[in-house]
Image (cartoon, helix red, strand yellow):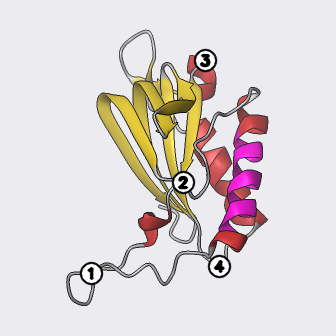
Amino acid sequence: MRVVVQRVRAASVAVDGKICGEIGAGLLVLAGFEEADGDSDLDWTAGKIVRTRIFADDNGTMNRSVLEAGGDILAVSQFTLYASVKKGNRPSWSRAARGEVSRPLFERFVAKLAAELGKPVPTGVFGADMQVQLVNDGPVTLSIDSREPE
């Protein structure tokens, strides 16, 4: 499982010009899955996202998690995180899980994020052509891979 996490002041996702998910300050999480991903990947990644300390404390030091900061999370599925550009100029997404595998993984991941955060996590529309808007804060952007925890 791969995610890109961006600290935001606000973020939204729209389909066909209609906003289907939005948050104020918090984290925008772009999530991609591969066929081999399972509950251990979802658990580890959701916990890591909610507990990573990338929000400022009273001294301005990144020392608080999204949970401690009272922020929100917006989750968007994004199979393109598994792009391979080793050959030629057209990316290959052969490692990305097919929709029938990744949709339930994404749904379980969002449920795990919501449980860890203690509140609902809005999302985009799985498989749709989505437009994501965000106001990056910092900017702070992390790339996390459950197969390569650093």
Disc 1 designates what residue? 90
* Dominant secondary-structure state across the stretch colored magenta: helix
- Residue at image position (48%, 20%) is 25
Instruction: Give the residue number, with chain letter if any, for mark 4.
Output: 35
Which of the marked residues, 3 or 2, is nearer the chain's N terminus? 3
Q: Vertical placement of 68 versus 29: above or below?
A: above
Residue 64 position in % (x across, y down): 52, 25
Viewer-side label of 4, 3: 4
Whole-number angstrom distance, CA of label 1 to CA of label 2: 21 Å
Looking at the image, is mark 4 or mark 3 earlier in the sequence?
Answer: 4
**Which numbered disc, 3 or 1, marks the residue closer to the eye?**
1
Circle 3: residue type:
Gly
Q: Which residue is mark 3?
A: 70
In the rendered image of this protein, does residue 90 appear above or below residue 140?
Answer: below
Q: Earlier in the sequence, mark 3 or mark 1?
A: 3
| Classed neighbour count for the residue bearing mark 3: other residues with Cα under 10 Å, few (<14), some (14–19), many (≥20) | few
Mark 1 burial class by Cα count in 10 Å: few <14, some 14-19, many 20+: few
Badge 2: how crowded within 10 Å, few (<14), some, or many (20+)? few
Of the image marks 1 and 2, the number of the one nearer the N terminus: 1
Who comes first in sequence, dot 2 or dot 4? 4
Q: Nearer the viewer, mark 3 or mark 2?
A: 2
Closer to us: 84 or 141: 84
Q: Which residue is mark 2?
A: 128
Task: Identify the residue at image location x=21%, y=88%.
Answer: 88
